[in-house]
Image (spheres, rainbow, N blue to C red):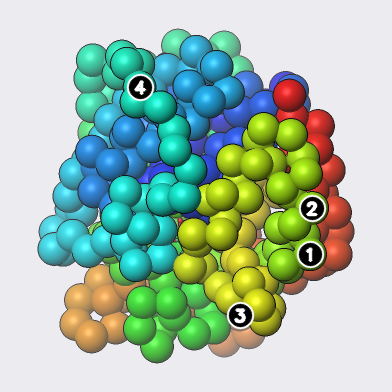
Amino acid sequence: MRKIIIDTDPGIDDAAALTIALNNPELKVEMLSTVAGNVNLDYTTENAKKILDFFKKDTPLAKGNSLPMLREYEDASQFHGETGMNGFDFPGSKRELLPEHAAVEMKNRILASEEKVTLVTIGPLTNAALLLSMYPEVKQKLAEVVIMGGSTIDGNTNTSAEFNIKVDPHAAQMVINSGLPVTIFGLRVTTRALLTKTDIEKVKTLGRAGEMLYSLFTHYRGGDLEKAGLMMHDICTICYLLKPEIFKFQQTQLEVAVDGPAAGTTVADLAGRYTAAKNVKLAVEIDQKQFRDWMLAEISQLK
Ligand code: RIB
Ligand code: CA
């Protein structure tokens, strides 16, 4: 069983990733932490509470940063709805939060863990950067950082920058250059992690979790249900932890632009033309059918 911490900005595709991660017996989610991203921190935190309540999990939850390190905060509510999880009527939550900032709570759990912990980030990397800069001693207890973010193809905020990195490029640069093993899923792969209309109709038949996800997916604007399908960006990180053979990777040097019009853009030296350094394991291919089969199988096993 792999111990993981997930930093998230739910967010409809986050909700799908959390659904699988919280319920798969091969993963032990030590805690969740929330960050401002798809929607503001209050909404992302409420949404994380609702997902935990829906699955009756006692997973600790900590609230993180409401703002990026330096840049002005921008949201993605146009894709996820005003609350970030429009589409399903979750009851209000009375769940208590952990008392400290996410970076402090992550530090406490990582240092207290016997075995190494895997940090999974599926939103802007502000909390992860704060953790590593405030408490560098956690690095010896982190097995890997698994990131959904970046792009070596087009962007989804402008022609080149992917949202999670665009919101906080300074934080992304700090984590990617932390010296830790980093595995990163950018748009080259996550835009091909698609659920078609037929898949979504199948999801609807998969119990109460399937009904909930179906309601969210029909309100999610990350892709086009009538054409290619919906992009399951964040769940690629969880799929990698459980079924890595679905992907192909290349070790490469990835740089992040932090200023000017290209801020948030990630550039990979894929040909190894400019440096011998290789700071990330970059996902470069996905077996689309195996991904769809895996996701439907995971949802069908939920209680
Ligand atoms: O660009 C896709 C990423 O931005 C995903 O994590 C999605 O949830 C949004 O946060
Ligand atoms: Ca996300």
Determine the secondary structure under disc 1.
helix
Q: Residue at x 50, y 13 (%)?
A: 58
Q: CA distance from mark 3 to mark 2?
A: 38 Å
Q: Residue at x 44, y 38 (%)?
A: 89
Disc on the earlier residue, 4 or 1: 4
Residue named by callout 4: 93
Residue named by callout 1: 198
Give the x, y percent position of residue 146: 55, 47
Give the x, y percent position of residue 291: 79, 58
In which quadrant of the rendered image does the C terminus lie?
top right
Disc on the earlier residue, 1 or 3: 1
Q: CA distance from mark 4 to mark 3?
A: 46 Å
Quadrant observed for ligand 1 in the rendered image:
bottom left
Residue 270 disc label: 3
Residue named by callout 2: 202
In which quadrant of the rendered image does the N terminus lie?
top right
